[in-house]
Amino acid sequence: MARSKEFEVNEVLDKAMKIFWEQGYEKTSMSDLVEHMGIHRRSIYDTFDDKHSLFLQAMDRYSGKVSTTLLAEIKASKTAVEALHKIFDVMISEAEDTPSGCLIVNSAVELGTRDPDVDTRSLESFSEAERMFEQIIQWGQREENSPLIMMRRKWQSTCTIFPLASEPWREPRPIRKN
């Protein structure tokens, strides 16, 4: 009869994520993982297969947690600009119990060129962030009184006025209001 696990998988995965985040993949030994995760080496192998698989699952866990946090902030925002502010606040604030930096960026720098699994996960995470920003920018472009729209209108009026000032021989063009 198989023994039941005496630990919560996500809880020990969070501990592994933190130690990988602090030290990186290469500097984290199996002994470090055993100590920080608080489970036996055999349990790590039985649950996660090997150090590399554990690392990839820790990256996935990190990406999921960050995405969940950012999406909650976006949904709670009333405007696109507010959403952008909240995202940057989350990204630059460091909780006391978390290492500095970003596990995905750190992993891409450390392993991205020689580990295709890390490279793929990193690129997927970066693409997800790009899509999130694109959606927020599109949201802002649809808002009538958005600072993004106001900036666009100012830019358009500037582009209309400056050619008139720099080319006095041309007939003045009417300034259009959008």
Image (cartoon, helix red, strand yellow):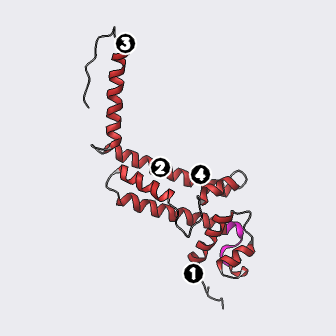
How far apart marks 4 and 2 lie (CA) works out to 12 Å
Residue tagged by mark 2? Answer: 131
Location of the N terminus by quadrant is bottom right
Vertical placement of 121 versus 165: above or below?
A: below
Residue tagged by mark 4? Answer: 123
Question: Toward which corner of the image does residue 100 lie, by quadrant?
Answer: bottom right
The residue at the far top in this view is 169
Is tag 3's residue or tag 4's residue first in the polypeptide sequence? Answer: 4
Is tag 1's residue or tag 4's residue first in the polypeptide sequence? Answer: 1
Q: Which residue is located at x 65 percent, y 77 percent? A: 37
Please name the amino acid that badge 1 sits on. Answer: Glu
Question: Toward which corner of the image does residue 142 lie, by quadrant?
Answer: top left
Count all numbered tags in the image, as a single digit.
4
Residue tagged by mark 3? Answer: 167
Whether the magenta-drawn stretch holds residue 15 is answered as: no
How far apart marks 3 and 4 lie (CA) works out to 47 Å
Is residue 10 found left or right of 147 in the rendered image?
A: right
Is tag 2's residue or tag 1's residue first in the polypeptide sequence? Answer: 1
Please name the amino acid that badge 3 sits on. Answer: Glu
Q: Element at badge 3?
A: loop
Please name the amino acid that badge 4 sits on. Answer: Leu
* Tags 1 and 3 touching, CB below 8 Å: no
Residue situated in front as seen by the camera: 137 or 5 = 137
Q: Residues within 10 Å of mark 2 (few under 14, many from 20)?
A: few
* Tags 1 and 4 touching, CB below 8 Å: no
Q: Which residue is located at x 70 percent, y 73 percent? A: 49
Residue tagged by mark 1? Answer: 8
Q: Which residues are magenta?
A: 46-53
Is tag 1's residue or tag 3's residue first in the polypeptide sequence? Answer: 1
How far apart marks 2 and 1 lie (CA) works out to 33 Å
Please name the amino acid that badge 2 sits on. Answer: Arg
Question: Toward which corner of the image does residue 87 lie, by quadrant?
Answer: bottom left
